[in-house]
Image: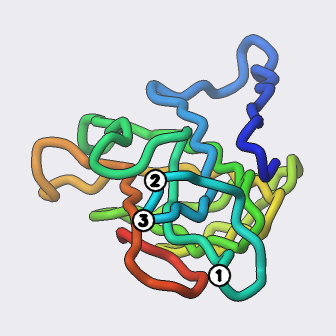
Amino acid sequence: MAAGLYGAFMIDPPRGQQRFETDRTLVVSEWTADAATGRTRGAMQMEGMFPNFFTINGKSYPDTDQIRVAAGKPVLLRLINAGQFAHPLHLHGTAFRVVARAGHPQRSSELRDTLTLESGGTSGHRVHPARGAGGCSTATSATTSQTTGPGPAGC
């Protein structure tokens, strides 16, 4: 995955099972970008190779795609970590319930605002954008970072 070639296969539920008005897959990853040359390479856990560039579906903020949904309408976000590092992820303006981890359904009713997704990990989130949080909720953000160590950026 360090070369940046990755994707996802989704298996739709059988007919008659709950579907979501909005169902999106978000693949997160990280890169090391050389500011002097503009060249990028996969990140590694060694000095000089820590990530400084973070992406969602291959794009970094402000070029990431926003997911706009009506308040109160349920949303399914499928998260995949294609990177080498764990990523703490959260949504802006709303909480979520984890409905699947590593392809297995989860029965937790606990509302969360952050989840750490390990390298190669997958997670499904049921989101109910809050009423009164504006006309819509933005469900994604990512950015580049000027830091030299691993960690979340842009949230």
Q: Amino acid at mark 2?
A: Gly
Q: How many marks?
A: 3
Q: Which residue is mark 1?
A: 48
- Residue at left offset 77%, top offset 22%: 13
In 3D space, how far apart are the residues under numbered discs 1 and 2 (Cα atoms)? 15 Å
Write down the quadrant of residue 68 in the picture. Answer: top left
Please tell me whether mark 1 sits on a helix, a strand or a loop: loop
Which mark sits nearer the N-terminus, 1 or 2? 2
Q: Is residue 76 above or below residue 38?
A: above
Q: Are marks 1 and 2 in contact (CB under 8 Å)?
A: no
- The front one of 127 and 29 is 29
Write down the quadrant of residue 101 in the picture. Answer: bottom right
Q: Amino acid at mark 3?
A: Ala
- The front one of 85 and 125 is 85
Q: Is residue 31 above or below residue 51?
A: above
Crowding at mark 1 (Cα within 10 Å: few <14, some 14-19, many 20+):
few
Question: Can you give x and y, in whole percent of width and height, for residue 75 in the image?
Answer: 47, 39
Q: Which residue is mark 3?
A: 35
- Residue at left offset 83%, top offset 51%: 105
Q: Are marks 3 and 2 in contact (CB under 8 Å)?
A: yes
- Residue at left offset 51%, top offset 70%: 52
Please tell me whether mark 2 sits on a helix, a strand or a loop: loop
Q: Is residue 71 above or below residue 7?
A: below
Res. 38 mark: 2
Q: Is residue 98 left or right of residue 133?
A: right
Q: Amino acid at mark 1?
A: Gly
Question: Can you give x and y, in whole percent of width and height, for residue 140 in the image?
Answer: 39, 50
Q: Is residue 9 left or right of residue 28?
A: right
Which image quarter is the C terminus in?
Answer: bottom left
Which mark sits nearer the N-terminus, 1 or 3? 3
